[in-house]
């Protein structure tokens, strides 16, 4: 019997009755990433729920979604800044090597 390249995992988010079934690629980092993401979402959800009382679960998940989007955008901006810095260093290094060879 041939082993599939993909398999299913189940992840559970707080206050949602049924786990999500996700298909991930075998022997990849996908499973760990989804499990870490689930843990992160549940952690932030619990933090918001303990600090801000009286909201429904949709509102807490909305807050988590906004935080996650902010973190993604910040990381993306940091990556772009790092790439620009590396490109500048490579340019300066090339100029230095050209002058000193």
Image: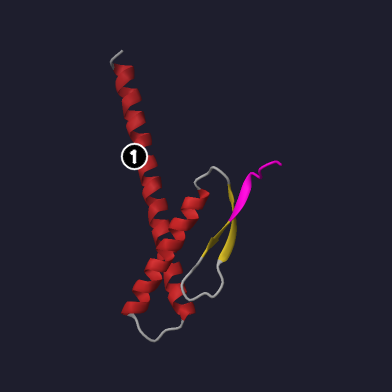
**From this viewpoint, which residue is outermost toward the right?**
1
Q: Quadrant of residue 89?
A: top left
Residue 49 lies, with reference to residue 40, above or below; the image says below
For residue 94, what is the image quadrant? top left
Circle 1 residues within 10 Å: few <14, some 14–19, many ≥20: few
Furthest residue to the bottom? 54
Q: Residue furthest front?
A: 1
Residue 42 lies, in percent from the top left, at: 42, 68
- Is residue 34 placed above or below 63 in the rendered structure? above
Membership of 57 in magenta stretch? no
> Which residue position is annotated with label 1?
85
Rendered position, 1 above or below 67: above
Screen quadrant of the C terminus: top left
Give the extent of the magenta segment: 1-8
61 with respect to 89 (left or right): right
Residue at image location 40% in from the left, 72% down from the top: 45
Residue 10 location in percent, x, y?
A: 55, 61
Give the main secondary structure, helix, strand or loop, of the magenta stretch. loop
Q: Is residue 70 left or right of residue 25?
A: left
Quadrant for the N terminus in the image: top right
Percent coordinates x, y for residue 81 in the rendering? 36, 46
Residue at the image point whose x is 34% and y is 35% from the top: 88
Could you say which is closer to the camera, residue 38 or residue 64?
38
* Residue occupying the point 34% across, 39% down: 85
Q: Secondary structure at mark 1?
A: helix
Residue 27 in picture, x, y percent from top left: 54, 42
Q: Residue at x 36, y 29 (%)?
A: 91
Q: Who is closer to the viewer here, 90 or 4?
A: 4
């Amino acid at each position: 019997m041939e082993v599939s390249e993909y398999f299913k995992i189940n992840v559970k988010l707080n206050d949602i009755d049924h786990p999500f079934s996700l298909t991930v690629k075998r022997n990849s980092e996908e499973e760990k990433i989804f499990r870490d993401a689930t843990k992160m979402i549940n952690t932030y959800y619990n933090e918001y729920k303990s600090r801000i009382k009286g909201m429904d679960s949709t509102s807490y998940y909305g807050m988590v979604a906004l935080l996650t989007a902010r973190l993604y955008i910040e990381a993306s901006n940091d990556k772009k800044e790092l790439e620009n810095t590396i490109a500048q260093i490579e340019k300066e290094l090339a100029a230095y090597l050209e002058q000193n060879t």
